[in-house]
Image (spheres, rainbow, N blue to C red):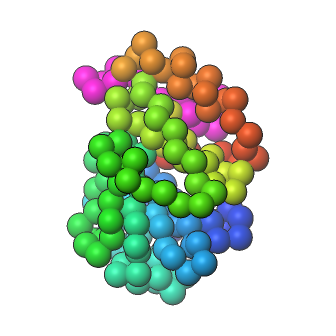
């Protein structure tokens, strides 16, 4: 397991098995996750969190960048959290957090900007990499527009779904 501190109150978990990275935001003690990785990383995720003194019941909100199994596979661990995705993201607000709808990789793809950190899901990766758009749920004709939107944002750290 690899836990990396991105900035004060922002942590990145990456895993041995295939699955998305998980990001933890600690906002004045309120614990928010961005994506929860694949089911096969459940134990590692729990132990990563407990290494930071976070219990699964402490997680208040889970934000899902898109509904692929390698990103939303551990939602059952967080039964006390409120989960937000494309369907209900409009109901969520957090001071300083911006939400962007970025269809392309999937039609329900979201990106989040918080404290200069861009959480880009599977839309944009490091070194100019971009997400696949050949899934049934992809919207390839929207991808360029979404990438342009993300590239135009004022961020200093990119935190994609896979590193
Ligand atoms: Zn995906």
Which quadrant holds residue 149? top right
Left/right of residue 147 with respect to residue 65 in the rendered view: right
Inspect the magenta stretch and tell me whether residue 23 lies in it: no
Left/right of residue 73 with respect to residue 58 in the rendered view: left
Q: Viewer-proximal residue, 11 or 98?
A: 98
Residue 128 x %, y %: 65, 28
Which quadrant holds residue 5? bottom right
Left/right of residue 33 with respect to residue 150 in the rendered view: left
**Residue found 59% across the figure and 61% down from its top:** 95
Residue 37 x %, y %: 38, 56
Q: Can residue 13 be seen in this view?
A: no
Which quadrant holds residue 47? bottom left
**Residue found 47% across the figure and 31% down from its top:** 102
Residue most toward the top?
Answer: 141
Inspect the magenta stretch and tell me whether residue 134 lies in it: yes
Residue 28 x %, y %: 60, 78
**Residue found 39% across the figure and 62% down from its top:** 62
Residue 9 x %, y %: 64, 71
Residue 154 position (above or below residue 32) = above
Residue 139 position (above or below residue 45) = above
Q: Viewer-proximal residue, 92 or 49?
A: 92
Q: Can residue 116 be seen in this view?
A: yes
Residue 140 position (above or below residue 3) = above
Main SS category, magenta section = loop
The span shown in magenta is 124-138
**Residue found 56% across the figure and 81% down from its top:** 29
């Amino acid at each position: 397991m690899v836990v990396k501190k991105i900035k004060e109150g922002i942590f990145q978990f990456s895993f041995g098995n295939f699955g998305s990275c998980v990001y933890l935001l600690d906002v004045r003690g309120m614990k928010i996750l961005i994506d929860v990785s694949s089911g096969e990383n459940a134990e590692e995720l729990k132990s990563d969190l407990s290494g930071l003194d976070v219990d699964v019941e402490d997680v208040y909100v889970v934000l899902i960048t898109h509904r692929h199994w390698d990103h939303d596979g551990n939602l059952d661990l967080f039964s006390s959290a409120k989960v937000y995705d494309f369907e209900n993201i409009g109901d969520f607000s957090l001071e300083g957090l911006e939400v962007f709808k970025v269809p392309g990789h999937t039609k329900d793809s979201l990106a989040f900007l918080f404290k200069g950190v861009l959480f880009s899901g599977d839309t944009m990766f490091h070194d100019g990499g971009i997400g696949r758009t050949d899934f049934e749920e992809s919207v390839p004709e929207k991808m360029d527009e979404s990438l342009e939107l993300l590239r135009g944002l004022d961020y200093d750290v990119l935190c994609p779904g896979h590193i």
